[in-house]
Amino acid sequence: MEAARSYGLGAVSPPSRLPPGAIDHLDMVEGTLKIGYSARAPLTDPPKVRTPLVEDETPAKTKIHIDLDENLWLHFVRRAPEQEPADVSVDISPLKGAMRLDIFCIWSPTELAIQVVDRDNPQRNVRNEIGPNSP
């Protein structure tokens, strides 16, 4: 698997679109996309409603959706033509207090994963995956 492609987001409203290089990267059969997210205030309470952070679609019709729900679960959804739709979620409540997060979206034909790291304290991180090696 190649190195992660990195892109940055500020505080997001409405949801961000990814830069052209990131969009093209999503069409690959497997890959890792690193998204840097900076909040206006420390992560504390969950949003009152499910909040989309990223929504985008490639010219080849691969779709990505990342959102944060009312329980501080971050959801990563990837839909690619001729592949089964897949989504994975992770509880980010252990990262309360963080202002800058790195979100890693990882996919392959057999795995989908999301990892979120506190950029200022990388030992604070959470991960979840679906696939043959998942718990």
Image (cartoon, rainbow, N blue to C red):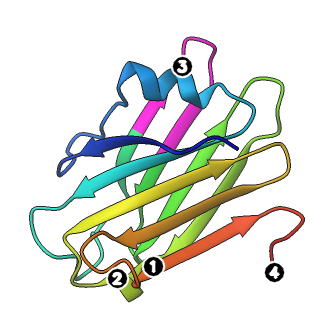
Q: Position of residue 120 (x, y in %)?
A: 24, 75
Closest to the observer: 33 or 49? 33
Which residue in the rendered view is the most extreme toward the right?
A: 132
SS at mark 3? loop
95 in magenta: no
Which residue bears the numbered disc 2? 95
Q: Amino acid at mark 3?
A: Thr
Label whose residue precedes the other's in the sequence (2 or 4): 2
Task: Please state the extent of the stretch shown in magenta in the rendering.
Answer: 55-65
Q: Position of residue 29 (x, y in %)?
A: 75, 32
Count up the numbered dots. Answer: 4
Q: CA distance from mark 2 to mark 3?
A: 31 Å
Which residue in the rendered view is the most extreme toward the bottom?
A: 94
**10 Å crowding of disc 1: few (<14), some (14-19), many (20+):** some
Badges 1 and 3: C-beta atoms under 8 Å apart?
Answer: no
Which residue bears the numbered disc 1? 125
Q: Position of residue 33 (x, y in %)?
A: 51, 44
Query: Which of the 4 image quarters holds residue 31?
Result: top right
Q: Residue at x 42, y 36 (%)?
A: 55
Badges 4 and 1: C-beta atoms under 8 Å apart?
Answer: no
Label whose residue precedes the other's in the sequence (2 or 3): 3
